[in-house]
Amino acid sequence: MPQQIAVITGAGTGVGRAVALELAATGWQLVLAGRRAEPLRETARLCGGEAVTVPADVTDPVAVDALFSETAERFGRLDLLFNNAGTFGAPTPVEDLGHAEWRAVVDLNLTGAFLCAQAAFRLMKGQDPQGGRIINNGSISAHVPRPHSVAYTATKHAVTGLTKSLSLEGRPYRIACGQIDIGNAATDMTAAMSSGVRQADGRIAPEPTMDVADVARTVRHMAELPLEANVQFATVMATAMPYIGRG
């Protein structure tokens, strides 16, 4: 099987880094994207030093075009986009959320995901052999909200619509699109879970977490299916977290 090429956004930390390590260990060639160069270099080092690092702000159309142009120039094709870059934003009651804070979350979680998917779609549609796979990082919040998370929850519900639209429009071109919804993977972004986070009834309570490597293995399974098969939606979560019955 020829070496496969993947672009991972938000690859400097957390889920993005874990997925990079998992794919590198199984022979993928990686293009690692993120806003900060140093964490990307550290991810590349942990992957064995072979990964390409491209500092890029996925909310900037020019930066996104440059990211996928460099991928095409280096490797001639793209087999996988893991659309992972995102932010929760500061937990804020809906009536207090400022316009700038709303826009920052929407621009990164939704517009950034769209811009990267659009660029990947163009590349996959035009390459020979045609096709590829896009995996969007949704969230448990694509199903149910947390308190004080209106911007994050709204964007993750919107990512589900993006996933469905890409799946439909990709059919004629062998472009498969799926979504992984993650709950309480242990990363820097979820560090507060173990000490206590606000629940639907107003209590502050600790929540169980799971190893982020389990998320990475799930992404790899989705990524390595033949294009004739697709995991449309996968939910991977800490077994005992308050999701079933939340609220």
Image (cartoon, rainbow, N blue to C red):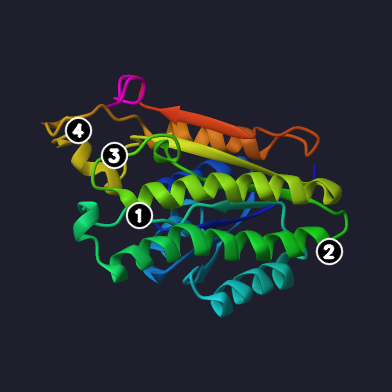
Residue drawn at x 52%, y 38% is 180
Is 47 colored magenta in this rendering?
Answer: no
Q: Looking at the picture, tell me which residue is in the foreground, 32 or 192.
A: 192
User: Disc 3 or disc 2, which is closer to the eye?
Assistant: 3
The kind of residue on which mark 1 rests is: Ala
Q: Looking at the picture, tell me which residue is in the foreground, 147 or 62.
A: 147
The residue carrying mark 4 is 199
Give the label on residue 146, or none. 3
Secondary structure under tag 4 reads loop
Q: Earlier in the sequence, mark 1 or mark 4?
A: 1
Secondary structure under tag 1 reads helix
> What is the distance, in whole Å, between disc 1 and disc 3 at their CAs?
11 Å
Q: Residue furthest bottom?
A: 62
| Residue 168, visible in the rendered structure | yes
| Residue 24, visible in the rendered structure | no
Give the label on residue 126, or none. 2
Q: Quadrant of residue 237?
A: top left
> What is the distance, in whole Å, between disc 4 and disc 3 at their CAs?
7 Å
Q: Earlier in the sequence, mark 4 or mark 3?
A: 3
With 233 as the anchor, is 93 left or right in this view?
A: left
Q: Looking at the picture, tell me which residue is in the foreground, 34 or 85.
A: 85
With 187 as the anchor, is 118 left or right in this view?
A: right
The residue carrying mark 1 is 151
Contact, mark 1 vs mark 2 (Cβ under 8 Å):
no
Q: Earlier in the sequence, mark 2 or mark 4?
A: 2
Residue drawn at x 47%, y 37% is 181
Q: Quadrant of residue 41?
A: bottom left
Q: Is residue 6 above or below residue 65?
A: above
> What is the distance, in whole Å, between disc 1 and disc 4 at their CAs?
17 Å
Q: Which stretch is magenta? A: 240-247
Q: Position of residue 130 (x, y in %)?
A: 85, 54
Q: Classify the position of the N terminus by image quarter.
A: top right
